[in-house]
Every structure is written in C-alpha cells, then in structure tokens.
Amino acid sequence: MSEFGGTHQDRLKLRFVKPEGKISRRELLKLVLPRYEVIPFIESALCRGNKECGLCLATCPLQAIKVEGDEVIIDTTLCTGCGACTVVCPPRAIVYPTFSLERLDKEMESSLLPQGTLLESRIIALICQNCLPTPDKDSASQFLLPPNVRGLKIPCLAMASPWLLLRAFDRGAQGLALIANRKCSVKLDPNIWQENVRFVQSLLECWQIEPQRIRAFAMADDFHKVVPELDQFAQEMAPLAPTPLGLAEPTVLPGDGLLLPALIKGLADKVGGSAKGAVVAGLVPFGKLEVGAQCSGCGLCALDCPTEALTASASAETDSYQLLFRHDWCVACGRCVGVCPEKCLQLERILELDRIDSPAAVLFEDRIARCRHCGSIIGSRAMIEKLQAKLLVMGEAFTAQLELCPACKVKDWE
C-alpha cells in the first residue's frame, strides 16, 4: 500500500448510504454523514475515443459511460465503481486508483508467501466487495479465513478478468476462489465472469494443470457460511503438486500495450513452451479473422481496429499492398466485421496457442495503386478497379478521378 499515493478530490464520488431494514437511531445519525467513494476515470490523452474503440460503452452494465463531443466520459452520478470497464480498455485509459491492475498485482504479491515457508499462503480468494454484508462492507479482513487462504477484495467480479486470474497463478497461487452473492448488486450478468473462468480453466488444461484449482462460491447474507467451504477447498488443494506457473519468477509485463498476450506467453514459457492446441471454451478474449475472396483491400477494417491487430501495409519497394493480422492482439470486438463494405470478414472467438507472439499473418495481398499524376500510393489495385466498375455508369472522366491522390484531385478540379 505504501507504493500508492492518495486519490485526488475530483476522482471521488459523494454518496449517502441507503439504510436497509430496521436500524437504530444511532445508526440513522451515522448514515446522514456523506461518504466518498473512489470511482474510475478516463485519461483523455490515452483514450482512443468512440470512433476508434468504444469497447467500454458496451461493457458498462449501468450505461454510465457516455460520449460528449469527441470525448468518452464516465457519468459519476450513475457509476457504481464495479470496474467492468477497466478490463476491456486496450490502451489502459480507464484508471481505477484503488483497484488498478498494478495495485491488485502488488496485493497478490504481498499476500503470497515465498516458496518453502512453513505456513504457505497459496490460495487467493477474490471477494466481491459489493456483496459483503452491510453495513461493514469494508471489514472483509475481519472474517476469519482459513490460514492458507488470502482474501483480495475487488469491487465486483466484473474485474475477475482472465489476466487477473492467470496473474494469481503466475505469482505462485496454488488455488483461486471467487466469492460473490448470487444476485449481483450492480446488475452485472454473472455469466460474463463465469465464462472468463471457463476460458482460464480450459487454458490450464492445455498446460496440463488441474482446472479444479479455480472454484466459485456463492455467498449468502452470512459470509461466515462460506468459510467451511473455503476450508474444504484448501484441503483439496493441499495434496496437489505446485503448478509450474509459480515456480519461476513472475512474468515481466510491458509498461504499455496489451497485458494478457504477454502474460500467456510468459506462462507458456514456464511450462516449456510446448503446449499446443486451441482454446474455445468460455468467453475467449481473442479472435481469429478470415477474409473472403471478395475482399478489395479497402482498409476500412484496419482503420477501426482498436488494438491494431489488423493493419494495412503498402510497400513501394515490393509494389505490394497487404492486410496484416496479429492473432494475439485481437480482442474479438468485431468492429472490423461491422464496417466491412464487402461483408467478407469472418471472426471466430478462439485462442491458438502456437500463434501467441507470432509475426503478423497476411490476410490479403495485391499490387499497389499509384496516383497517375504524382505516383504516390493510394491503395490496392483491386479496390480501385472495383470502384471503377461500380461507377462506370457515371462516365470515364469521373472514374478517372479514382486514380488520383487527394492532393492531385484538388489540382485536377482547379
């Protein structure tokens, strides 16, 4: 905790606690006092905006993320701080000071005792903070967990992303528990985090690691009823051999860019890098893109890719125009499929392990088209020819404009 400073006043949300059930007069007077809650905010300098990304808008269960002009903002009057938006932002522009990935990572590091310690804290329990009994939502540490289970509070299991689950094993956890109420207080569909769990379990199986090392626990109003189940889970984990994921040093993650592909690559290296196959179970956060024969290489799909998994490349030296695709950078958002004018893109949610950290694949290749006046590259030859065929009815003089760059078009019209 000493590595993280305080939170600025403009990042706090003023909130009055609504009483539940019968309360005493003393409790009523306490509830009158306002409370300040830390909520996520968007770093506008890092945000790519709704036109180029917008993944956070569809993720928020309360529609608290909105577009104002060219900026994406979080409506503090609607946001409950569940953190669902933080795990889907590719450039990491959404900042959650008290529950950042860096902070949660440090808490896991401090919770897991080193290998060889007599009392091994080898199980991490992700506890939904909003599901804890009121009024003591901040007192999860007062609940007596089994000695080798360490609780890690998160605002909602919406933040139980594949990265967070895998990072726990990378840090040395031998088991992972997820604890939440049956009914989410922020109206999040529980299938989302449950499908994340299925994906990680399937990935562990590819590495020949027992998928039962991850288990979800449904919490009722009385948190103490979960403790015996956690104790039983800890006893089941005790005889299992340590996973190879936590035997070596934790994976060094990049300072910017996508964290999940780098983490999976690091974990694959720990198991020998020999794991092959594909993961299709659960909500796979990766996509595989295929292009049909009718593609003209217009490049609109590449313009709309928020992670630059799909890019257009033109080389004057080789006289070639290409659409390149990085499988491990694709988050399967489907934006490229939606903007394709030829409707020739097909996206499949899948993770092919042998394509992690591999060079970009060529999806489309054609000769480049050059401006007939200045010779600058204007796109693919197939795109120009297709547009000319469609617009031929308007006359040759009009279609000839397609073979000019924007600057030469202006000169030609003058």
Image: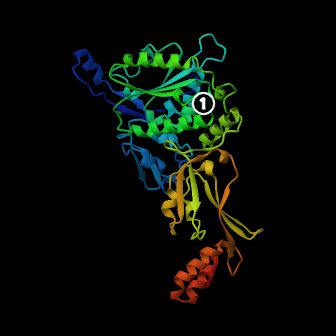
Of residues 381 and 246, the one drawn nearer to the viewer in this rendering: 246
Above or below, comparing residue 226 to residue 57 in the picture: above
Residue sticking out furthest to the top: 118
Amino acid marked by disc 1 = Ile
Quadrant placement of the C terminus: bottom right
Residue at the spot of label 1 = 209
Quadrant placement of the N terminus: top right
Left or right, 246 with reference to 152: right
Q: Position of residue 322 (x, y in %)?
A: 67, 65
Is residue 10 shown to the viewer in this render? Answer: no
Of residues 397 and 368, the one drawn nearer to the viewer in this rendering: 368
Left or right, 144 with reference to 167: left
Above or below, comparing residue 246 to residue 268 in the picture: above
Q: Residues within 10 Å of mark 1 (few under 14, many from 20)?
A: some
Of residues 260 and 177, the one drawn nearer to the viewer in this rendering: 177
Of residues 412 and 202, the one drawn nearer to the viewer in this rendering: 202
Residue drawn at (40%, 28%) of the image: 180
Q: Position of residue 293 (x, y in %)?
A: 59, 69
Q: Secondary structure at mark 1?
A: loop
Residue drawn at (67%, 57%) of the image: 361
Above or below, comparing residue 401 to residue 357 in the picture: below
Residue drawn at (58%, 24%) of the image: 173
Q: Position of residue 210 (x, y in %)?
A: 57, 29
Colour convention of the picture: rainbow
Q: How many marks?
A: 1
Q: Quadrant of residue 92?
A: top right
Q: Position of residue 374 (x, y in %)?
A: 71, 78
Residue drawn at (63%, 80%) of the image: 403
Above or below, comparing residue 147 to residue 282 in the picture: above
Q: Quadrant of residue 168?
A: top right
Is residue 220 shown to the viewer in this render? Answer: yes
